[in-house]
Image (cartoon, grey):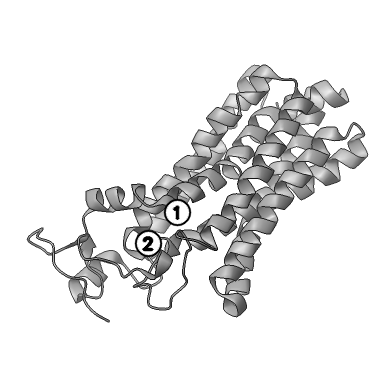
Amino acid sequence: KAFGLDEDTAWRAVMVIPGTMALGIGILLYFFSDDSPDGNFRDLHMSGAKQKTNPWLAMKRASSNVRSWILFLLYATCFGVELIMNNNLASYFTEEFGLNQSTAGLVASLFGLMNLFARSLGGISSDFFSKRFGMAGRLWVFFVVEFAEGLFLLLFSRLRVLGAAIPALIAFSTCVQMAEGATFGVVPFVDPVATGAVSGIVGAGGNVGAMTLGLLFSNFDGPQAMLYLSFVVIGVSFTVFGLMIGPFKVIDTESGRQVAAGKTLDDELVESESSQAEPIAQE
């Protein structure tokens, strides 16, 4: 509006700003960042420190790993929930609290504002507790923030006083973002050789969760949809224990050459320059 645009045009024009920023950051990352903490993949491949992997076999391996799908469900109920809130919060505050469109949008933006620190906090907390408790520390952090996310969403869905709803929304959002960070604190340990494929499956869970769980808002009013959504989040949070105990337990190892249930990584994913499979170099 400051540039003389009407409301219908202004919100479309403003999309140029994040688009331009994303493009600029992408260019900076391409020229000034490394591919991984160990360096650029090309250099690692040339030095023999890292072998190339067959992407098709990596995806086959990741998709047949039950741990990938447990994390898929968990990410559906954190990042998926974030996308649902982004789509519905402004209208929720308009309909349930009687706010005008501008004020409702401002209040709803508090949810996204937590992204400034909370997602990183989830990853930092995962790393911090893993130093003392190993993988169990990562998974307990994951469970606590995911379970708390469901509880704060349940609380938020019941509140009708704006002054109480806003703190509940902030606490809920903080847990949502922390759960997202905690998710990817676990992902690298599911299968170190096929981490990229596992990440892709888990990341897709967020979009699938948004599409499927978002249907609640098409069939119920806002408060009821959020209440039912909170039940889903709380229920799914308990699947974290499937990664702690039993046949799908994820094990944290220093070398990264062992994965869940203590099984040694096989050699089928590693490609030589002639595209023939060869054993993983022993450390």
Whether residue 134 can be seen here: yes
- Secondary structure found at label 2: loop
Q: Is residue 183 left or right of residue 278?
A: right
Instruction: Name the residue at 64% across, 17% down.
Output: 8
Residue 179 point in image, percent of width and height:
62, 53
Instruction: Name the residue at 88% across, 35% down.
Output: 159
Q: Which amino acid, mark 1?
A: Arg
Residue designated by label 1: 67
- Near-viewer residue (164 or 100): 164
Q: Is residue 205 left or right of residue 275?
A: right
Circles 2 and 1: CB distance less than 8 Å?
A: yes
Camera-side mark, 2 or 1: 1
User: Reading the chain from its start, which is encountered first: label 2 or label 1?
Assistant: 1
Instruction: Name the residue at 82% across, 41% down.
Output: 155
Residue designated by label 2: 191
Residue 182 point in image, percent of width and height:
58, 59
How packed mark 2 is, by other alpha carbons closer than 10 Å (few <14, some 14-19, many 20 or more), is many
How packed mark 1 is, by other alpha carbons closer than 10 Å (few <14, some 14-19, many 20 or more), is many
- Secondary structure found at label 1: helix
Instruction: Name the residue at 36% across, 71% down.
Output: 258
Q: Which mark is residue 117?
A: none
